[in-house]
Amino acid sequence: MNRVLTFFVFFAMVAGIAAGWGINQFVDKSQIPEVTGYLGIITDLFLRAIKMIIAPLVFTTLVSGIAHMEDAAAIRGVGFKTIAWFVLASIASLTIGLIMVHLLHPGVGLVLPNPGPSSLGKVDVATFTLKDFVTHLIPTSIFDAMAKNEILQIVVFSVLVGTAVSAIEHRAPAVMAVVEQGAAIMLKVTGYVMLTAPFAIFAALASSVASHGIKVLSTYAQFVGGFYLSLGVLWTAFFLVAVLAVGRRAWALFMAVRNPTLLAFSTASSEAAYPRTLEGLVKFGLPRRIVSFVLPLGYSFNLDGSMMYCTFATLFIAQVYNIHLSIQQQIPMLLLLMVTSKGMAGVPRASLVVISATLTFFHLPQAGLLLILAVDFFLDMGRSATNVVGNSVAAAVVTRLEGKRGLVEDEPAAV
């Protein structure tokens, strides 16, 4: 079934690009927004379905995973190892982006018109303050958090509930049964939703190409190519880390998450790939309790592709406007991105908010944000796929740090 779905996903990608090109070339320009609006219905329905299942799936899998841990010390141990790895991975991702943009100079000599401030109101940076971030961690109502898909608040509540269940002498068997059955039901619902993924992929790509034309991929060739080359460096680093974590099965680990990675790439949403990533890692042999703990946190704290993009895009804008940032300025920039990127949702264009906040903080032209909007979808595809791979490797690393060597090396991979 996975191979069939993979084939249809690839077919949908090719067909979507072809259909978008046809619309762009042969449909009256004034009618293209209407056509893409109809295509948007398909993608909106798919992403709404994904958002519909994310909150209950995260809650049930995370509570179940934490409740099955031996004791509170085990939760603290896994939590500490997870956060420590996320910090290291974040620093590595941001630094690789910083180094690569200086090596490649994608914005140097690039002649682009100053687009002006007309569309800057689309990006709101008001919520990106340390005070608001910290207070936002605790939900005033879990029902409100679930209704709004505030994944970080759901994670905090789920950790508290899971810890409380694990602290009860008999682990509240009735609650555990409900949570585990709920997780099983939501995974089944997820399977139904994912069957519609090729249609959403076709519509998303067709709409983007129809609106911007094939030239959208070549207009910023240096920027796009440089960023994907940087992602290649990051993926190589991930693979080396995976070798250290799971040994000879590193390639099998990557193959186990190939479908969710492709889904994230095609839909430009790492959130859309969460259910399949969870399923693939468990089939690979990683403990569900660890995967269910690491992945939800990863979607708030470990978006490696998005963090690299923030560094790469910010310095690209500085290069376009011929603005030099000293090392003394770039190091605080990395620290700022470390803070503002935490809790950034794994959905399309969320990183634009972080970039805009960084531009404001360092007094870079806000109009520069518009320079990357035309190709942001195509770049979002790459960074979303990278987020999935980064979180998958994180789960394997935490499993190894927990001493689960046999689980990740001796069991056969399901790929």
Image: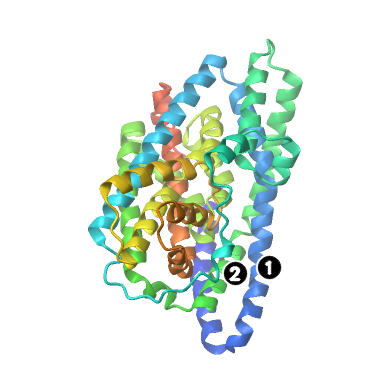
**On screen, 10 above or below 262?**
below
Q: For the image shown, how many numbered marks are present on the structure?
A: 2
Q: Earlier in the sequence, mark 2 or mark 1?
A: 1
**Which labelled disc corresponds to residue 218?**
none
Judge from the rendering whether residue 21 lies leftward or rightward of residue 275; answer left or right: left
Q: Residue at x 46, y 44 (%)?
A: 256
Q: Which residue is mark 1?
A: 41
Secondary structure of the residue carrying tag 1 is helix
Q: Residue at x 56, y 48 (%)?
A: 345
**Amino acid at circle 1:** Ile
- The one nearer the camera, 288 or 377, is 377
- The one nearer the camera, 43 or 141, is 141
Q: Which residue is mark 2?
A: 203
Distance from label 2 to label 1 (Cα)? 9 Å
**On screen, 349 above or below 77?**
below
**Amino acid at circle 2:** Ala
Residue 242, percent across and down? 35, 37
Mark 1 crowdedness (10 Å alpha carbons): few <14, some 14-19, many ≥20: few
Mark 2 crowdedness (10 Å alpha carbons): few <14, some 14-19, many ≥20: many
Residue 395, percent across and down? 46, 34
Asked if marks 2 and 1 touch (Cβ < 8 Å), the reply is yes
Judge from the rendering whether residue 384 lies leftward or rightward of residue 198; answer left or right: left
Residue 69: in sight, yes or no? yes
Residue 17, percent across and down? 50, 74
Secondary structure of the residue carrying tag 2 is helix
Residue 238: in sight, yes or no? no
- The one nearer the camera, 76 or 274, is 76
Q: Residue at x 31, y 72 (%)?
A: 110
Residue 371, percent across and down? 43, 69
Give the residue furthest to the left: 103
- The one nearer the camera, 216 or 247, is 216
